[in-house]
Image (cartoon, coloured by chain):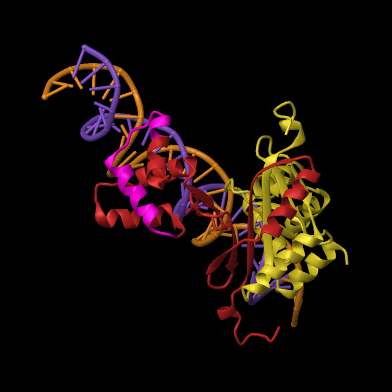
Chain colours: A red, B yellow, C purple, D orange
DNA sequence: GACTTGATGATAACGAATATCAATATCAAA
DNA sequence: TTTGATATTGATATTCGTTATCATCAAGTC
């Protein structure tokens, strides 16, 4: 199912309305394949349409998360960022602590191990969040031979 | 080396001073083997001594983190919490998303796998943070048979 | 004991997320 | 199509944890 369709179904299911602003915001978000903060998305949307407020962008991102189209990522800098989720494989992040550049990482083995650990403690996993911080090749160049 | 001694060495190394307030705050923190927010630690310290301000507790926790005695944990609720690090094995967290109860988890295999992943991308790992959210046995009881 | 300079406490400033509210738009029903 | 109940909106106020400010105080050196 198309992501946009899924969102609209979500709205109807919740008794919410489809509006011009929500359409615009969701369209822009879905088109951009990257992590965005509320402010960043607001700035982009605002360039096309002066009639969209910050609050509406924030509210719509919340709805997008609720609907399963995106998820919140929090690298601990106090800013919530949102990334695509629907139609995207789960992944974790490897973040350069110097320049902030990150890559998405995934390992089936890792996931399985985590699941095992959870079961061992009697928990039922809902989701997890693995952020690895390190130095990227570019930032580490010339620093050491390892 | 005793944790307290290590902290005092850290202070001297940085050209900082040992004060009554820092002593008190560090003592209380080291005695309590649990995660604490600035506010929580402040409340506890304040009960013993009315002459310690919130700002000093916040500043001291920052120093404790810098000195390697504690680390910041952030479960994404907007509050920084601090946990012991010195003399404690590295571990990750398995958190109940219903009641907030958590257990510390550790797996050597998991750590190794992560290290491999990092190397594969040409990064040099500094640290990582794995939080798994799920339902704890108590909260999940009677809900489903799985 | 005096002096240099870091430390302190109270509180202001900050920043992001969220709440508020009057005006407006949606959409189902008439 | 018009209407009306109510969800939505934009601007902004509020909230809340963290951080900065600054006059006063105290640690540690001489």
Residue shown at the point (42%, 41%) measured from the top left: A6
Which residue occupies the extreme right position in the image?
Answer: B1
Residue A45 x, y percent position in the rendering: 31, 54
Q: Is residue C24 above or below residue A98?
A: above
Query: Residue A73 placed where, x, y %?
Result: 54, 53
Looking at the rendered image, the quarter that the N terminus of chain B falls into is bottom right
A15 with respect to A131 (left or right)? left
Evaluate whether residue B18 shows in this view: no
Q: Main secondary structure of the magenta part?
A: helix
Residue A63 in the image: state x and y as whole percent: 44, 40
Q: Which residues are magenta?
A: A11-33
Furthest toward the front, the residue is A1
Residue A20 counted in the magenta span:
yes
Residue D14 x, y percent position in the rendering: 43, 37
Q: Is residue D5 left or right of residue B133?
A: left
Picture residue at 52% right of the left edge, 69% below the top: A101
């Amino acid at each position: 199912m198309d992501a946009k369709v899924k969102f609209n179904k979500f709205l109807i299911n919740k008794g919410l309305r489809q509006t011009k602003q929500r359409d615009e915001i969701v369209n822009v978000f879905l088109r951009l394949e990257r992590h965005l903060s509320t402010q960043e998305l607001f700035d982009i949307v605002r360039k096309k349409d002066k009639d969209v407020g910050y609050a509406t962008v924030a509210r719509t991102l919340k709805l997008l998360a609720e609907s399963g189209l995106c998820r919140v990522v929090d690298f601990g800098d106090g800013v919530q960022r949102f990334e695509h989720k629907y139609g995207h494989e789960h992944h974790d992040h490897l973040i350069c602590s110097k320049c902030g550049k990150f890559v998405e990482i995934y390992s089936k083995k890792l996931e399985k191990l985590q699941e095992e650990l959870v079961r061992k403690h009697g928990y039922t996993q809902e989701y997890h969040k693995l952020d690895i911080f390190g130095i990227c090749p570019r930032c580490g160049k010339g620093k050491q031979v390892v």
